[in-house]
Structures are given as structure tokens and as C-alpha cells.
Image: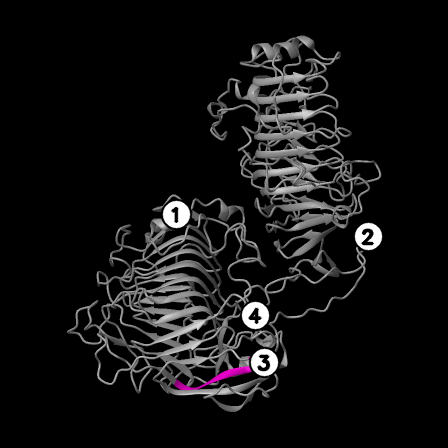
Amino acid sequence: MKVQMSKLKLLLAGASFAVIAACSQGSDIASPGPSAPGTPPGGGGNGGGGNGGTVSCPTGFTQTGSVGDFTACEVSGQILSNLTLEAVDGVAYRINGRIDVGADIGADGNKAGGQSARLTIEPGAVVYGASGADYIVVNRGSQIETLGTATQPVIMTSQADIERRAADADDLGGSNTAEWGGLVLLGQAPINRCLSAAAAPGTVACENIVEGVTNPDAIYGGDDANDNSGILRYLQIRFAGFAINTAGNELNGITFAGIGAGTEVNHVQVHNNEDDGVEFFGGNVNVSHLVLTGNKDDSIDTDNGYQGNIQFAIVVQNDDIGDNIVEASSVAPGALPASDATISNFTFVGNRTNAFRLNTGTVGTYVNGVVDYGKECFRWQDSAGDGNTSFNAATDPSFRSVLFDCDAGVATSNSVAGVPDAAIAADSNNLLGSNSLASRLFPGPVEQGITPVDPTTLGSFFQSASYAGAFSASETETSNWASGWTFGLFPEAACPTGTADTGLELNGETICRVSGVLTDDLRLTRGNVYEISGRVDVGIDVGADGSAAGGDTAVLTIESGVTLFGDSGADYIVVNRGSQIFANGTRENPVILTSENDLTGNQVDPDTATAEWGGLVLLGQAPINRCLSGSATPGTAACENIVEGVTNPDARYGGADADDNSGALRFMQLKYAGFAINTAGNELNGITFGGIGRGTTVEYVQVHNNEDDGVEFFGGNVNVRHLVLTGNKDDSIDTDNGYQGNIQFAIVVQNADLGDNIVEASSAGNGVTPLSNATISNFTFIGNRTNAFRLNTGTVGRYLNGVVDYGKECFRFQDSAGDGVAGYSLANDPRFDSVLFDCDGGLATSNSDAAAAQGAVDQGSNNTTAVASSLTGVFVNGTAETAATVFDANALDSWFEPVTYIGAVENGSDRWWAGWSCGLEASSPC
């Protein structure tokens, strides 16, 4: 074998991109960084492009001129003995007409005139056709072995493709299809659609032919479920499907006709085929790592009793071409062997006809999938499954652990009524809702939240994969099973519409500028870094009841792994009432909002750096108790307020919708913010929650080194789980204006040089409803600045299962707290249960209501001030914490997760905070 080392650049090399230096307003970034590494659009392999047809063909092959930069070496006629297409640098093999590998030996191997042969294609070899007359048929009893590798795939493509890429290496072919024939595999495995009406399906007598392939017919079928038609490994088939006859019959990219489980098929791509990407006519061949892109008809078509398995499948339709992603059929309901494919770990993306068209007796099992589709999910015909008009989980297609996100709804109007919905509802782990995919294909928090099926329980073919979708959480654009050998799957990152390309790069990523008022939805895609330029408004305020004149809603979506930065206090984000933000971070790829100084390494001292940009302001329609108008009733739609300092326009919040939904913040870091946003010196909190409702999701969020508070809740009732607050200069948690939400699992660690109170809790006044009445459970508070708790002005609240390790007093407990009466009332004042207080300065400051502070400890259940904390690693429970009696927070509100420990972190094995946050352990500095 002659290994290609450098000569396929035009087919395999990545596109090159010119870098243009430009200026960025207010930015210290003056020149682009290095080009971003990534999977080449050409699809892996070593470079080259050939020698303009000057290389000689291997012995036994005839040179027929050149194509692009390659010498063309002809393959034609019948191959009746074993033949190898060597990978020779600068050589491409021309398929001239129909190529038959072997002569059909029949269903039982005894057909007169039959002869077996094997066609072997070495890693990196290029094979091409010029028209629909050029295609390969592997007959029953014969084999094809395409022995590609992750860096040297075998490529079957068109003459036009080679010529395009010789002229322009960045030309990925657009929507071109039908430039040559395709690949037809014919086997002896069972099928259920017989050419002869007298034949019994699934037997050796049941044969059929591939439509349009004649002279001789392409006959398939038999009774050998383990039939072996060879190996397809690391193979691309591009731009095929041209009509092979005057009747207009088009070939699929790969036709699997009666192919058995003895055949190996893995790491195969079909790109821009005129007909289906792959079609399975019966048989039971198994396929792993399948990529189907831009195919004009169906991407996956199963029929005639196909019973194989497919695992790890990516389908991306072209914007301009494509029909269904899956069309699944059979002969008729009840026909055996049933068309009953099993597909696991798939990601289907498209916007053409339907994601699934199911009909004519097909069954099938679809598990661990993600469907992101611009039209309906299903065309579910009443002939599918058992052919009845009601859903039967035993006899109809079934779906388990699949996310369905289809813009036009679940099913087409001509689908059988109710059945698609019933199929989704049949498994509690199916999810109907919005996806959070990054870079089209990579899982975000929604996908990671799906409870997967263990694929190994489906059969021995399946690999363990504890996730939904084709890619795992640890895979990225440049490191995944499809990188290096596929074609056009991972396009070069570009600034999304709605942002501006600055012409600059930072750490190899393009800087895209986000600015102004967003009135259209904007998705910040992975592969770029985003500059927050000035005040960025998401939407225009729609008012407390949604009817404000001039209101306009928008959604800002931030994909996992995306970083945004600001350069000054003038740079901040405001999400107005009626609009939403989705920070779709994951543990492996959190969303990061930070400063330019942080990213460029220009901080004088990162440990104490604060106030390097503005922050994040969320404004909602949930009830508040401090009204801008003296005539408004607290908790009603008339009660609104504004965030101090955010003007022109004012940042208004409040309303009467406790379930208001401002989006989701998941796995997000916000660092070094809080710079004064105006000349009056008003500083933003890291995150301001202004009237945010419990329809909003906030989990796994960190605010680090903010100049003002870490998080502040102005009314509303948003719930927060897994909160990390580190190094914030004012209060870490500030609650006011009637905040009534829940917080569970909160780590607060103050900086030795920065910080005020850990908690400051206030309200509009004593007895003003809705009360400021937060419930915080499973918290660990570490610090040595002012106080652990400052409680005042009518605040109530419940504090449960906590550990307080503080260098000064635990409390500044003002007599204005709770009911505003000196002394302690368990019913009306802030309440503590199962909290270990270890404060070096004593229980309360000298200006506290000492009786109230002591009463809070004594009258609550299982509190202690007599036990020293035994925390390890700063915030991980030790023996003292483990011995504490736990309060059942779930009994107060079912939102709380049941726990058997106090504090935020149960033990050294409890690492919910790790991997996505920074600064909590030496291996993950901020």
C-alpha cells in the first residue's frame, strides 16, 4: 500500500481565511490572534492536491487524462477477481459506467454464473464518477472494503467536485447534487417484500430488485442474517444520485439492499445526494457513526423489513433541499420480518418537510435523540405500525428519551390524530420543548438534562452512551468522532446576524460586537467571542401587563462555551420585561461574562480586580412591594419600580405575574463587573433580578469579584439552585422589595480584602406585602468582613441547613427587621433552623437587637453556636457538619430537593460546584 502523505489538499484541506486587522472602539485589542484550529471543511486527511495529472497510474490501470490536479485512472466493467485501489498521491480513480463487483451468486450462493470478488479501497484513495451512468454495484456474494481512517477517509465524489475544489479549495459545492451515480450493496439477508408473490417473506425464496438498476438486474435478499458484504469504514460519498436511466431513477447515496449483520459500517457520510442519503431495503446491517448532510430526498429511509441498528447519527439538512429526515415504511402492517429499526443517539437538524414520516406497517425504536426541526416533527400516517388509528406502544413506532423541538408543532394536519402526541407521552423521559444545542449539534443544558436510555440494553451492538444526541458533553467542534474525516459538517464560525464582525480576533476566535437594542431574536454561537458594546437592551419594555406602547420582545440565546466581555461600566446587558435570555452553559462549557482585561491578561491583580465592566440586569413582571407610585398597591400590576442608575430608558420592573419567565441562566460565570454606570457612581450588581418570576430557571450560576452586590433580588419569586458567590465587594446576597423565592445549595466565600455582608435582607417596611420572605437552604457562608447577616426593615425569611464560618459577628440584627418590634418573634421575624454558627466576633454586633439575635438561634430548631465548624477545603462538610440534625426543607416547599445534610457541599464526593465555576480550587483559577 502506498500511503498518501500530502497530496489531497484540494479535497481534504480546510478553507483558509484572511485576517484583517481593525480597530475596536474602547478596546485594548489591537491585532488578531492566531487562526482558530478546527476540522477542515474538506474533511480531514493530509494536504496536497496532486501534481496536475503527472503521476502515473498503478500497474493494471489505464490513464484517461487528468481531473483537477489528479491523474485519472480508469476502473470499468465487471470486477471478477479481487482488486485493490491503492492510495497513490496525485491519483484519482475514474468510475467509467456501471462497475459490478462480482457476479450475483443468488440468495443461496448457487446461482449459475455467479462469481465472488472483493474490491478494496485503501485509506485516502479518491474515486469519482462523471455522470449518473457511473456507479458501483456490489453483488450478492461479493464484498467492498473501504478502509479509510480518521485522517485518511476514502472519498467517492464527482468529477465536478474535484474540478470545483481545484479552482477554489473553499468551494463546498453549495446545493449541487446528482453529479454521479452512487453505491449499491446487494446482500443475502432477509427481506419482507418479495418479487414473487409465491415467495414467503424472510426466506431464501424472497428476493427483490433495486429499481432502475438493470442489465443485469440488481437482485437482493435471502435468509442469511449474518451475510457479510464487506467493510465501509471512514467513507465519504458526495454529490451522487444522478438518474441512472431514461426513466429518471435516481440512486441513493448508499443503497443497502438485503445487507446482513456481518457487514461492518462505521464512520460513513453521505453529502448532497439527489435521492435518499441512505436507504435500507430489508436486511439487518448495523451502522455506527453516520453523518448525512444536505441530501435532497429523505436522509434515512428504511423499508422492506429492515431490522438493523444505528447508533450515533447526525443529520443536517440543507436550507434549500431535503424532504423527510426519516421515512420509515414496510410492505404492510404485520408483515414479517417487520421493518423495525432501532436508532440511538441521534441529532436531527432541518427545516424541510418533516423530521419523521412513518407509514405502511413500520415499527421501529428511537431513543436518546434530539430533533431540532423548523416544521412539524411527524407525518404519522394511519398505516404505520399496526395500522390502527390509536397508539399501541407494543406495535407502533416508539420514542424514548427524545427531545422534540419542532417549530410547526408535533404533527402535520394529515397525520393520524392523537397518535404522535401519545407516542411522545408514552415515555416520561421524552421532552417537548426548546433545545439548547450549540454549534447546531453539541449538547447544551436541556439535552444534558434528558434522562437517557442505556443503549446497551437494546442489544449487544450498542455502545454505552449515557446521553441524548449524537455527541457527548465532552466533545467539541475540534474534538469529536466526526472531526477530521467529514465534509462541510463544521463550517468556520462567523458572526451571527445581529452582531458586527470587528475584524479582530482574541485567542483565535473572531470578536463579534453586540450593541444597541435587540428587537429580533439573537443567538450567540460558539466559536466566536462577543464584545458587549455599551448598554445592550434585549427587547423594549412591554410593561407590567404586556401592553406598553412601543413594547417589543426579543430573545437572547447564548450557546454553551460562549464568552462575552465588556470594557467599562458603560458595557452591560438589560433584559427588559417580556423578553428573555437563555445562557445555555454546561458543566464542561459554561457561558462566561467577563471583562476585556481578564481575557487579555491586563489585570493588575486578578484576586482583587473588580468593576471592569457593567453587569447583567434582568427585569420581570413578578410582584414587588416597593412601588414607584405612592398610589399603587404593592403586589399588583400597578406596582412598578426602576433600577437605580439605569436610565435613558429607565429599567422598569414589577407586575402581578408570579410565574413570569425571563428565560434561563445555567452554568454561567459572571466576573469582574460592577463598574459605575453613570457619573453619580451607581454600580450594578453582578446580576440584578428585578421582579423576576418563578418561570425563570437559574441554576449553576457564579458571580465573582463584583464591585457591588453579587446578586440582588428586588421582589419577584425566582428560585435559584447551585449558586456560587466569590470575592464580591459589597453584599453577596441582597434581598429586598418583597422577594419570596427559594435558594438551595449556595456557597459564598468572601475575599480577604473585599466584601461587606454575606446576606443583607430588607423590605419596603414592616408588614408590607408581599413580604420579603426568601427561603435559603443548604448554604455555606465563609468570610471575615462585616457580618454574615444584616437583617432590617421588615425582612422575614427562612434560613435552613446552613454552615456559617465567619471571622466577625454572625448578625447585625436590626430592630426594624421582621415585625419591627424589639425582641424576637418566631412567627414574625427571620427564622433559622439547623444552622451551625461559628463566628469569631460573637453572635451579634453591638448595635444589634441582641435579644432578637439570640432568640433566632434559641427558638429555631437545632441551631448551635457552641460547635466549631470542621469544614475542609474551605467549604466542604467535616465531622461537625455531618453530625448536625437536618431540617426538611422539602416539607416547606416541594421545590427543595430532599437532603440529609446541612451546608452546601455534603462531602468530598459532592462536586456540583466543580468543572464550571472558578476560584474554588487551585486547579480552576479565575
Residue 454 has which mark? 1
Q: What amino acid is at disc 3?
A: Arg
In the rendered structure, find residue 10 and report the number of the disc placed on it. Answer: none
Q: Which of marks 2 and 1 is nearer the N terminus?
A: 2
Question: Residue beneath label 3, please?
Answer: 164
Amino acid on which disc 1 is placed: Asp
Pick whichever of labels 1 and 3 is earlier in the sequence: 3
Dot 4 or dot 2, earlier in sequence = 2
| Sooner in the amino-acid sequence: mark 4 or mark 3 | 4
Secondary-structure class at tag 4:
loop
Q: How far apart are marks 4 and 2 (CA)?
A: 42 Å
Q: Look at label 4 and name its amino acid.
A: Gly
Please name the residue shown 68% across and 41% down the image. Answer: 670
What residue range appears in magenta?
89-98
What residue would you read off at disc 2?
A: 26
CA separation, marks 4 and 3?
18 Å
Tag 3, which secondary structure? Answer: helix
Q: Nearer the viewer, mark 1 or mark 3?
A: 1
Residue at screen point 21% across, 78% down: 110
Q: Are the residues at dot 4 and dot 3 in contact (C-beta closer than 8 Å)?
A: no
The answer to whether residue 535 shows anywhere in this view is: no
Label 2 with label 3: CB-CB less than 8 Å: no
Residue placed under numbered mark 4 in the picture: 45
